[in-house]
Amino acid sequence: MSKILSLHDAVAKIKDLDTILAGGFYAVGTPDDIIDEMIRQRRGKLTIISNDTATPTEGIGKLLYAGLVKKLIVTFVSNTPIVPELIDKGELELELNPQGTLIERIRAGGFGLEGILTRTGLGTMIEEAGTGKRMNLNGKDVLYHTPLKGNVTIVEAYEADKAGNLVFHRTQRNFNDTMCFAGDIVIASVVKPIKELGEIDPDAVMVPGAVVDYLVQQGA
């Protein structure tokens, strides 16, 4: 069965109330075509796990301004001023994580680990908010954090072949490769024309096709 779907059919795999792992750093590596179609199809009450919220007109920020997000799990939100407004209205829940903690929690979710232990965040708002639980290990205090997984992972890839093997271009990679292991369904939006099997050097593959479920050709 082909992994290549139309943009409409790929986004139809996303349901209301889903937890979405969204790749990208300041929207670099975020699949804007998928985001726009999610808004068009009104996929709502979503939990979004991502590095940041980009801007009001880019990436995850567009979902926020469309009123489709109920919870954010991110590292910072400074470029989307709607966030504190939504929190004050009781319309949005926000969980902040140190950047390294967030990606390691995602990695733990993708590789079947039961969480992570770190000293990062001890005695800060991270501990006060209950994001991490203090434990003592070998005489040292650490914070335990649960793993993070999603119903769907959405990423932008630079190249892909029909088997779903992905290649990212420079900073487009960011969190994307790790997130692909932590989603029950993985949808990749592909910049370049999707290649035939064998046209991508195996040494260049950054995410194996075995974990990628669907491909969307940008501009198709």
Image (cartoon, rainbow, N blue to C red):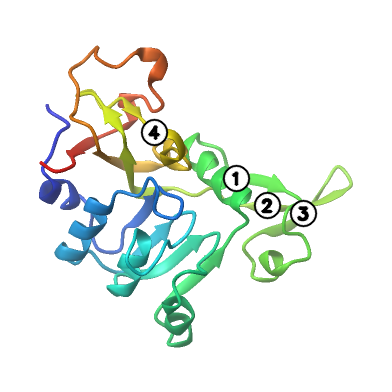
Quickly name the residue at label 4: 169
Q: Nearer the viewer, residue 27 or 162?
A: 27
Quickly name the residue at label 1: 115
- Counting residues from the start of the chain, the first of labels 2 and 3 encountered is 3
Query: Is disc 2 placed on a helix, strand or loop?
Result: strand
Q: How many circles with numbers are drawn on the protein?
A: 4
* Residue 17 x %, y %: 30, 63
Q: CA distance from mark 4 to mark 2?
A: 34 Å
Tell me what residue is drawn at x 51 percent, y 60 percent.
74
Query: Is disc 3 placed on a helix, strand or loop?
Result: strand
Q: CA distance from mark 2 to mark 3?
A: 7 Å
Name above or below for residue 62 compared with residue 113: below
Mark closer to the observer (1, 4)? 4
Q: Do residues under tags 2 and 3 come within 8 Å of each other at their CB atoms?
A: yes
Q: CA distance from mark 2 to mark 1?
A: 7 Å
Quickly name the residue at label 2: 144
Query: Is disc 4 placed on a helix, strand or loop?
Result: loop
Q: Nearer the viewer, residue 102 or 135?
A: 102
Q: Which mark is residue 135?
A: 3
Tell me what residue is drawn at x 36 percent, y 70 percent.
56
- Counting residues from the start of the chain, the first of labels 3 and 1 encountered is 1
Q: Amino acid at mark 3?
A: Met
Q: Amino acid at mark 1?
A: Gly
Extreme residue in the bottom direction: 89
